[in-house]
Amino acid sequence: MKELAEYIYERDRHEFSLGDTLDIKTGLILASLTFLAIQSGDLIKSGLTHLPIEQRIMQIVALLAMAIGGVFCALELWPRDYDREAMPEGYERWITETEEYRKAYPENDSGPVTEDMIRSARLISAKKRLAKNGTTNLNKSRYMFVAFYGAIVAFSANMVTLAMRLF
């Protein structure tokens, strides 16, 4: 049981830090989308009156992909509240409240708070945090992948447009 508890605490910490990792990666995708938007703007501006239909279509594809990528970057980067382990004061307050309850209702004979009770409560809380934070990160990861695919499509469309202009 001790090894399982250690694993749960480790996964809890991992899920909490994973949110920051996803945000950093999405920030890089957003920077790439910004660069691609500047590139598309220059391509469109430079050939505004003489841009062949094929290149216009490629730029429409690029602009749509960038818009979708940008929206999904915003969804991924939208601030969220992650559950975290309680501060020591939270556990102290819980112990005090439990002891007060025990004194107020001695007929329940719940017994004093033990280390096992605290360990069990921490483990239950860690499992709940793990489930909630894991779901949050799964959604953030999905948003990041859609944004990434948008950047890849926009990059490809810009590269095709550049190739058409050169050849």
Image: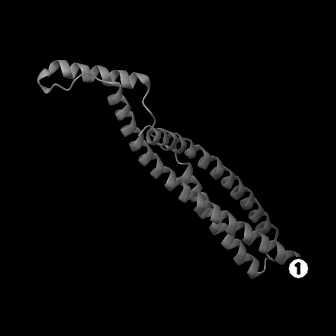
Instruction: Evaluate whether residue 13 shows in this view.
Output: yes
Q: Residue at 20% of width from left, 22% of height from top?
A: 101
- In front of the other: 41 or 3: 3
In the picture shown, does residue 15 fall above or below 85? Answer: below
User: Taking 58 as reference, is 82 left or right?
Assistant: left
Task: Residue 148 in the image: state x and y as whole percent.
Answer: 64, 61
User: Taking 95 as reference, is 152 left or right?
Assistant: right
In the picture shown, does residue 138 fall above or below 105? Answer: below
Splitting the image into 4 quarters, where does residue 146 fall? bottom right
Instruction: Evaluate whether residue 48 shows in this view.
Output: no
Report crowding for label 1: few under 14, some 14 to 19, many 20 or more residues within 10 A (C-alpha): few
Task: Residue 118 in the image: state x and y as whole percent.
Answer: 35, 28
In what quadrant of the picture does the N terminus appear? top left
Q: Residue at 88% of width from left, 75% of height from top?
A: 166
The figure's colour scheme reads one colour
Q: Residue at 29% of width from left, 19% of height from top?
A: 96
Q: Amino acid at mark 1?
A: Phe
Task: Residue 164 in the image: state x and y as whole percent.
Answer: 82, 78
Give the tally of numbered discs: 1
In the picture shown, does residue 41 fall above or below 17? Answer: below
User: Taking 43 as reference, is 81 left or right?
Assistant: left
Task: Residue 14 in the image: state x and y as whole percent.
Answer: 54, 43
Q: Which residue is mark 1?
A: 167
The residue positioned farthest toward the right in the image shown: 167
In the picture shown, does residue 61 fall above or below 109? Answer: below
Q: Residue at 72% of width from left, 75% of height from top?
A: 58
The residue positioned farthest toward the bottom in the image shown: 53
In what quadrant of the picture does the C terminus appear? bottom right
- In front of the other: 135 or 80: 135
- In front of the other: 16 or 124: 124
Name the secondary structure under disc 1. loop
